[in-house]
Amino acid sequence: MATLVLTSMVGRSPAQAVGVDPSIPGAIAQEYSGRDLRIRKDLGGTSAYTRHAITYESGDLTISGIMHKPRGKGPFPVVVLAHGYIDPEIYVTGQGFRREQDWLARNGYVSLHVDYRNHAGSDRDPKADLSMRLGYAEDVINAGLAVRESTLSFIDSDRLALLGRSMGGGVAFQALVIKPGVYDAAITYAATSSNTADNFNRWQRFDTSLGRRVIAEYGSPEQEPAFWQTMSARTYFSRITEPILMFHGTRDESCDIAWARATDAALTRAGKDATLVEYKGAGHYMYGPWYDSIKRVDRFLTKHLGS
């Protein structure tokens, strides 16, 4: 694994207590059923691609999303997009990946942006708040499975990658350890920590009602350290089979570069094919470095999905 440093242009277990098992082993034991990928509405497009509202089935839930399809017959490889945190109360379908959606479709990839449960037109899941994002990981896994079994003529179901940003990067790591082999390759931008306690302490623990509920149900990371380890993708990196390309800014104001370096080190210890690209001085959204990063994405996807 290589790290590249570049200069930026800018009695009762806690799980049993609520009837929800937010652990990675619990998720691994679960059956996954992603299917019935459908185009629901044409949304226009450009000279290079068309946009479509889509749905697919994720277990018992219907998940909404947006698909960008290159013009032409295909079949085209697919990149599933796992977006970062946006308050579900204000989130709109397909939000958070405009530049990636456009670039992918202009360069011969179908992009499938997942809305997640409880977002936009997706079905509701009342247990999602206490699942530590594992419900979102289930939706990402099932998006991949729905692509794999899709009969849409323009989709090449044998060439499939995952791209996660911020929270979606953390969700991507969860998906990779829970169900290896669904994707052929994975990319993360400015990912949250692969250690769940880091994320909890950063955003939820001290000033939210959800933080209080989580501690009441599962105990704090200090009270139940072993259990919190079972909620962390990092603990199970040995299961990953996909090559991974990671991007992170050294001055990320939301997701500390130390998190990316710890994830990188853990992947190295696990012997995985992964590369962390650091952009010196870049913040969370990497406005300047994005142009360099997408060239690297192009080479990475060409290598692992074929041209």
Image: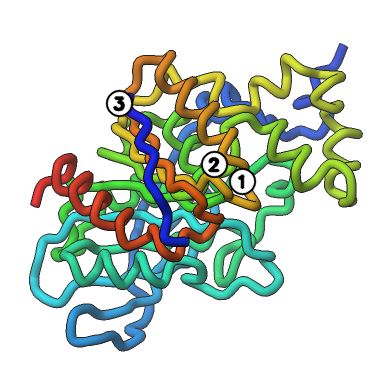
Q: How many marks?
A: 3
Check disc 2 and report the residue beneath it: 170
Residue 152 pos. (x, y %): 20, 63
Looking at numbered disc 3 in the image, what kind of residue is underneath it? Asp
Residue 190 pos. (x, y %): 51, 48
Q: Which image quarter holds the N terminus? A: top left
Residue drawn at point x = 40 percent, y = 70 percent: 66
Which numbered disc, 2 or 3, marks the residue closer to the eye? 3
Check disc 3 and report the residue beneath it: 273
Check disc 1 and report the residue beneath it: 255
> Who comes first in sequence, dot 2 or dot 3?
2
Looking at the rendered structure, the secondary structure element under dot 2 is helix
Q: Is residue 267 left or right of residue 284?
A: left
Residue 57 pos. (x, y %): 44, 56
Looking at the rendered structure, the secondary structure element under dot 3 is loop
> Marks 1 and 2: in contact by CB < 8 Å?
no
* Above or below for 49 versus 32: below
- The answer to whether residue 149 shows anywhere in this view is no
